[in-house]
């Protein structure tokens, strides 16, 4: 029985690590998007910022598997243009 409990702890630890990585990834892009919106003249208020959460996104799958690959270039990918709805071959926004 202890072996099963140990396995569950390992799975929970791995899930926690994956969840922390997703939250970090989302937080970095939320920060970049907010800065870009402010630079474009959008009124970024404290009330709007208080509603942001790195867990409120459809691309997070808490029940699935995640694969993390190192990006080809350092830094963040370019933010998509909110006025352009075209997607590339990977299903990501341009």
Image: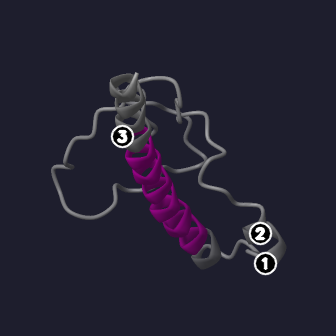
Image x and y of residue 18, in percent: 40, 43
Which of disc 2 and disc 3 is earlier in sequence? Answer: 3
Give SS at disc 2: helix
Image x and y of residue 83, in percent: 61, 46
The extreme left residue here reads 72
Which of disc 3 and disc 1 is earlier in sequence? Answer: 3
Disc 3 vs disc 2: which is toward the camera? 3
Give SS at disc 3: helix
Give SS at disc 1: helix
Residue 33 falls inside the magenta stretch: yes
| Residue 94 shows in the view | no
- Kindly identify which residue carries mark 3: 14
- Kindly identify which residue carries mark 1: 46
Spatial CA distance of label 1 from label 3 is: 34 Å
Q: Which residues are magenta?
A: 14-36
Q: Which disc number belongs to residue 50?
A: 2
Question: Image height check: is 75 above or below 18?
Answer: below
Q: Residues within 10 Å of mark 1 (few under 14, many from 20)?
A: few
Question: Image height check: is 21 above or below 61?
Answer: below
Spatial CA distance of label 2 from label 1 is: 6 Å
């Amino acid at each position: 029985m202890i072996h099963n409990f140990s396995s569950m702890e390992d799975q929970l630890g791995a899930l926690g690590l994956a969840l922390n990585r997703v939250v970090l990834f989302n937080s970095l892009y939320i920060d970049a998007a907010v800065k870009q919106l402010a630079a474009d003249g959008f009124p970024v208020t404290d009330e709007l910022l208080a509603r942001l959460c790195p867990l409120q996104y459809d691309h997070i799958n808490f029940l699935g598997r995640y694969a993390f690959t190192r990006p080809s270039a350092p830094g963040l990918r370019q933010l998509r243009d909110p006025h352009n709805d075209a997607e590339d071959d990977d299903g990501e926004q341009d």
